Structure formats: structure tokens, C-alpha cells
Amino acid sequence: MRKARVVSLLRFARPCSPLAAARSSGASDLAEGPTIIDSHAHVDSPKFDADRDAVLARARAAGVRRIVNVGTTVKGSESCIRMAAEHDDVYAVVGIHPHEAATVSDADWAAIERLVAAPKVVAVGECGLDRGPWNDAPMDAQERLLRRHVRLHRTTGLPLVIHNRDTFDDLFRILDDETASGGALRGIMHCFSGGPDEARRCLDLGFDISFSGVVTFKNAPELRAAARVVPLDRVHVETDCPYLTPAPHRGQRNEPAHVMHTARRVADEMGVAFDEFENVTESNTIRFFDMPPLDRTTNAPANSETREGPA
Ligand SMILES: [Zn+2]
Ligand SMILES: [Zn+2]
């Protein structure tokens, strides 16, 4: 089974190696090895204020071809849009995190509805539910905010980025209800935290699965079991930086360059060669967020519309 699936995915293979591409383009800051996309990061966080450009440079040198930078507040969403405008390889997601559910105003939501139309916004979120000890927003307020994001997903056609902490029961109840009343959903379960059963339910509901550094933690056997049941064409990897630093960097601030450790661990669990895994997940993430294809010959984002316009 596994072999047949891997062979069928060879159509995603890139035409030339990143090393050859880097050499032919003469670029100096490119990785000479595997490349990957960080499908969920918060490089807009104040924790990167002192060295943001160095963090982005390290990511590029490590082979991170693109970073999906995710808003958690109106202000953060604006920062993500600004960063996406400044950097070819950074994209933006706009939304409001469930931590903010108790204090979101109608004006805040109107701002999100405006921001979602900005260039390089590729999804709505992060939104969802969180029963973590540091979230005191009432669950009914979190549910209302999540359903607002679902409506915005339907009106814009942009996929949902879902955050979930210890709330699979409530999350499935809401997503089942939304599917029954409004039709199929499309999204990604960021920092997926369940086991194989929850993974299958998410996939059935139309959600891809994104693994964070938690998959490298000793105490996460269920999560690694989940990685073994996710189809190769529905998997993504992320840092969720500055949080959830993967082994062997635990205890440090996380950053996009570390996504490679997570990717290697997920590839191992799935029984897929790493070069296969990195090719396929890049294609998955580009397809999922409807990004322009990577330019395989220059290692820069393909953006022919702007390049070929009148001078
Ligand atoms: Zn999250
Ligand atoms: Zn996040």
C-alpha cells in the first residue's frame, strides 16, 4: 500500500535539486539540501523584534522556502500582512485567536473582514477553541468567534486555520453542525494534537493535518501514531514559533529554521524518505493555500504576473 502511494506521488517531484537551482541562480543565502515550507508561524511576535531579519535569513539558509505567518489579533494580522508585503517568501493569515474571544468587539471583527482582502492573505484564522489553563475566555464566546471565522471562510473561499487545545468534542460538534447546515468545510488543523481517531475525523471533515514540534517530544506517542494514518497528500509541517520548539532545541525560542526537525520526524513516522516527504509537503502546502508555484530554477517565488507586466 505504502509503495503504491509513494509512486503515485512522484508527479510532485521537482525537476531539479535545490542545490543545482541555487548554483544556477548564483544565490548565496540558499540551502544546499532539502527544502520545506513552515505552514504556521508567528514571526510577527514581539519575541522576534530584536532579530527578525536574522531569523528570516536563518530560515532561508536552512531551506525554508516559504513561511505562512498567522495573525492572532487585529494588530497581529496587520503585522502579518505588512511582513508579507515586505518579503516574497512570507504569506499572511488573518483572524483572531480564541484567547481573545472575551474581548473581541464588532469593530475588531469588521477590521478582520477588511483585512482578509489584502494581498497574499491565504487563509482565515487562527481561530478555534482552547481550554488551556491560561485561557479564561468563556466557551460560548469562543464558539461564537469560531463560527464568525467559518462564515468568513464561506464568503471568501479562503481555507480555515484551526487552533484546538483539549476541545476535540466541542470542536467536532461545531464543525459537524456547520457542515450539516452550510456544506463542506476546508481547512487545516494547525498543531494537531490528537491521536489516529481524531486525525481520521478531521480528515473526513475536510481538514488537512499540520504537525508541530510536539511530534518530537518524548511524551507524544499518540501524536506519532496519528502521523502514521494521515495520507501523504494531506500532511503539513509547522513551527508555531516562537512556541513549541522541537527537539533538539527544546528550551530555546522556536524559529522557522527548526521546522526541519519536525519534518524529519514526521517523515520517519510515515515511513517516507525525507526527500520524498519534503517534495510532497511543499506541494501540499502550496496547493492548500493556493500560493503561486515555487520557481524551481531560481529558488525564488514564481510571480510571473508582476514580472511580465508593462515596464
Ligand atoms: Zn494555535
Ligand atoms: Zn499559532
Image (cartoon, grey):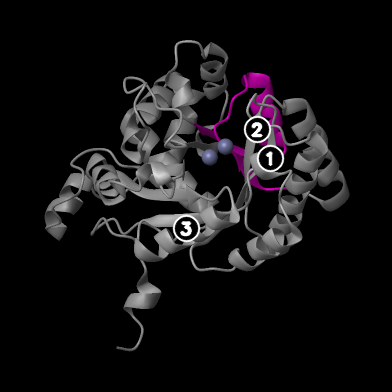
Q: Which residue is mark 2?
A: 164
Q: Which of pointers 3 and 2 indicates the residue nearer the eye? A: 3
* Nearest the eye: 93 or 19: 93
Residue 47 lies, in percent from the top left, at 39, 41
Examine the rendering and report whether any part of residue 11 can be seen.
no
Examine the rendering and report whether any part of residue 133 can be seen.
yes
SS for tag 3?
Answer: helix
SS for tag 2?
Answer: strand
**Which contiguous range is marked in magenta?**
184-211
Residue 129 lies, in percent from the top left, at 70, 35
Q: Within 8 Å of ligand 1, the CB of disc 2? A: yes
Q: Within 8 Å of ligand 2, the CB of disc 3? A: no
Bin the neighbour count of mark 3 within 10 Å (Cα to Cα): few under 14, some 14-19, many 20 and up. many
Q: Earlier in the sequence, mark 3 or mark 2?
A: 3
Q: Which residue is mark 1?
A: 128
- CB contact under 8 Å: marks 3 and 2: no
Residue 229 lies, in percent from the top left, at 57, 23
Q: Which residue is mark 3?
A: 79
- CB contact under 8 Å: marks 2 and 1: yes
Question: Which amino acid is tagged 3?
Answer: Ser
Any magenta on residue 282?
no
Q: Earlier in the sequence, mark 2 or mark 1?
A: 1
Q: How many marks?
A: 3
